[in-house]
Image: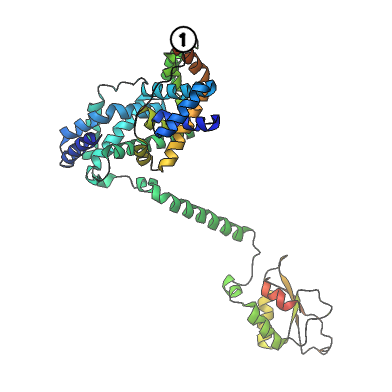
Amino acid sequence: MDSQKAIDHTLMRRVQQDDYEAFEELVGRYRARLVNLIYRMLNDQSEAEDLVQETFLRVWTHRQDYDFSYCLSTWIYTIALNLAKNELRRYRKFKFINLLDMASKGVELPDPRMGPSALGHMLQQAIAGLPAKYKTAFLLRDVEQMSYEEVAQVLGVPLGTVKSRVNRARAELKEQLKPKLEQSRALSQGALVPVRSM
Amino acid sequence: MRCRKARWYLSARCDGTLSERQRGRLDEHLETCSECRREAFYFSEIVVQAGRMESVSVRPDFDLRLKAAIRRAETVPASSFPWYRLLQAQPWRPVLVTCSMLLVIGLSYGTYQARFAPSSGVPLQSMASIDPETTLEYFGNLVSGTRQPGLPSGWIAIYGNSPEARRLQNLYLNASRGPNNYVVEAVDLDDPNTKKPAPRYVMPVERSDDMVRKVSY
């Protein structure tokens, strides 16, 4: 992780000297992760790409303001999440319905009789239904695999709050997906997976 | 370990943040409790599935669009930055909300004053300059005796025919009438029936708590 931070800082130093190639490299490192994160928050890929583009535009515009005492990833994620939060607020005011998305979603809806492979798809749908603060914490922790400390920095909330939000998100998802999880358990004969080591 | 405590640890177990001792006790419990083992499986499955979630691929023209957006942003002169963006900035919001509320309250009060408040023949400035305390004390010099026993509570009499008494009588005579006004009775002391003075004017006076105290003697 430290080497990643060092690479980020080296690139950012070059970016501060108006090196566009370094900026492109930086974009390459974060582009896909950010688009996926925002996509999972908004459920709209084109909107997610627009927001990530806006994020990088801000990184470039404010490159001289970057403080090297912070992690670059934290800075970039914070910008992206703030933009996504604003967008979610706007969504709440005006409901936009993308007809093409609706049509495609209609085709992709998983059949409940499908095997455990459909669990991932259902999980994505269940995540979309979570309250924004739980969703963000869960996505950063379990999907982006950030440490709790990093999530706390990105969200600007205490560590305990992050743990509580992640826990609540997992518990809600567990309740929503219980039938599917039970099916999956029957197939795997309930073997517990060692999930993550610190 | 009881089930309740075990379930509290399940999420932390997925993160690998339990201590050796906690982990050992939890695993012991999971071996004996099928319900908690089921719950543990659900939690771990959610975390595993979340880590394996399918990614969307970024459209190939992303970098080109970004480059074009940056070029556009750099060619726009700084002066064309929209001023309203400053107002949208988070730190200004409470100030804007407070100012808007004050503006609304001020406009409402102004409208009320203009439409419903009793109109006054006396300019507001002169009404405001009337300090009930001083005025009533001043009345004390003009008023002969105390409040007329026949007058209802809240009435005062401005007796006298001197220029000063007249001025005050006229001042209150011109004051507006309304449910919240007190009535002032002006009596001419030169009247032959001085001992039983007859009311000469009945005048409303703007209500004030000071005046109520003073008047209700």
Report x, y in % for residue A13.
Answer: 17, 41
B20 up-or-down from A13: above or below: above
> Would residue A95 be seen by someone viewing this image from the given angle?
no
Q: Which is more toward the observer, B194 or B85?
A: B85
- Residue A164 in the image: state x and y as whole percent: 46, 37
Q: Can residue B188 be seen?
A: yes
Residue drawn at x 66%, y 85% is: B138
State the residue at coordinates (16%, 39%): A14
Amino acid type, callout 1: Met
Instruction: Tell me: residue B84, above or below residue A138.
Output: below
Is A15 left, or right, of B113 in this rendering? left
Question: How has the structure been colored for display?
Answer: rainbow
A99 relative position to A153: left or right: right
Q: Is the residue A48 above or below the residue A104 in the image?
A: below
Q: Tag 1, which chain? A: A
Observer-nearest residue: A148 or B205? A148
Report which residue position mark 1 lands on.
A114
Residue neighbourhood size for the residue with mark 1, other residues' Cα within 10 Å, grouped as few (<14), some (14–19), many (≥20): few
